[in-house]
Amino acid sequence: MKKKLIIILLVILGLIAARYAISFLMQLNAAKAMKATALPPVTVGEIKSDSVQVSIPSPARIVSQYRVDVVARINGYLTKSYFKEGDFAKKGQVLFEIEPQQWLYEMEQAKANVDATRAKLIYAEKQLKRTESLLQKDYVSKASYDEMLSNRDNLKSQLALYQAKYKDAQRNYSYTHIKAPVSGRVGMIETTVGNYVSGSKLTTIYSDNPIYVTFPLSAKTFSYITKVDKGVMDAPRKVELFLSNGDKYEYDGVQEYYGNSIDEASGSLMVRATFKNPDGKLINGDYGSILIYTINKIDAPVVPQTAVMENPQGKYVYKMGEDNIPKIAYIQVQGQDGKNYIIESGLEVGDKIITGGIQKVIPNKPVRIVNEEELAQLQAEDKEQTEKKER
């Protein structure tokens, strides 16, 4: 009887021990599962080489091809204005009128002097021919002929002088109607009708089609571009423009000029591209950004722009070590290709980096590698829980 009780007791103790062991294992597995769940989920990609067309970003400024100050070239009262501020004016279109009467009188007086002197010259020519005929017959003296000749030559000189004055008077009279020297959009009127003008600036015209976009490139970058394009410096390279609001401009431009010196302060070279602007969307003085493309392609390692972070030390990615622990790896880029950065240094083909879920990664701390579908689902669930908490 006593032996049976001992056996029963041992069985009971064994069952209790087994229960505690199972419970411990379950708790251990649960802890492992929770730990795994707590690790930030990420996707990982491998650095590969690709044939890419390099594009270089740069801040840009829009500049009119022509900027012309419209100035009064004669003195007088401004009597008329033939346009509204902001209107588009064609080359040769009349913009202002300066009282024309004074300059009309001067032109008519100069014309009268020309006509009177020409009439005198015609008469002097006839007199000289008659005198020349009489001289051959010894009816007049040589001195009389010389006097007639001198008078004729003097009238010729006077006529030339009056003709020059007449042309000058015509020129001044033409200035009473001030015309647009180039086609473009007219700025604000700086001197209004009724004011006396004397060399005064009246307005400014900015040409707008085609239009320039200027942008700086570092000497190193420009040298790299020309190296990719096998030494060609002034090639017609494609340029894309992004407006100040971030929108891409509908027309592509062409690089057609680069500066002849490096700025000492910035170490950059000024480059210019020309864009079509038929609708006048691009306005002189506005800012934006550009992408300038090389003509040739190169083989180079690339990394998605979404995988790249930046801090005061520069651009970096999370590179996976041998133990799958992410570490910061600083990189140098040498341009873009679509949505990828072209790697210059810091990564090599075959390196593995974190491409998704970067926001929750802590350097040198473990992560959980998932595929893109799992990451998207986990992020959606996380967003939903966050929104519930906020409610």
Image: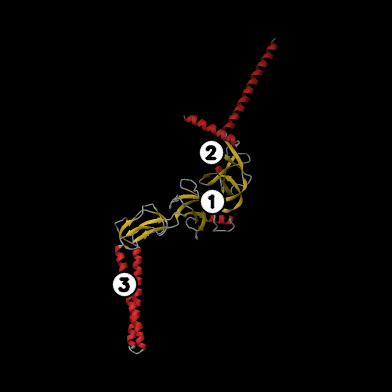
Which residue lies at the image location 31% right of the left edge and 68% below the top edge?
108
Secondary structure type for disc 1: strand
Residue 31 position within the rendered picture, expressed as x and y whole percent measured from the top left: 59, 28
Residue type at mark 2: give it: Gln
Amino acid tagged 1: Ile
Q: Measure the C-alpha gap from mark 1 to mark 2.
A: 27 Å
Is disc 3 in contact with disc 2, using a CB cutoff of under 8 Å?
no
Residue 29 quadrant: top right
Question: Disc 3 designates what residue?
Answer: 113
Q: Are marks 1 and 2 in contact (CB under 8 Å)?
A: no
Vertical position of residue 51 compared to residue 114: above or below: above
Residue 306 placement, left or right of 190:
right
Q: Is residue 230 left or right of residue 63?
A: right
Q: Which residue is mark 2?
A: 359
Dot 1 corresponds to which residue? Answer: 56
Locate residue 206: give its quadrant: bottom left
Does residue 71 appear in this view?
Answer: no
10 Å crowding of disc 2: few (<14), some (14-19), many (20+): few
The foreground one among 165 and 258 is 165
Q: Quadrant of the N terminus?
A: top right
Along the line of sight, the residue nearer the viewer: 319 or 172: 172
In whole angstroms, how far apart are the C-alphas of marks 3 and 2?
Answer: 89 Å
Q: CA distance from mark 1 to mark 3?
A: 68 Å
- Residue in front for this viewpoint, 249 or 23: 249
Q: Residues within 10 Å of mark 1 (few under 14, many from 20)?
A: some
Can you give x and y, in whole percent of width and height, for residue 361 in the image? 55, 38
**Which residue is nearer to you in this view: 360 or 85?**
85
* First of labels 3, 2 by sequence position: 3
Amino acid of disc 3:
Asn
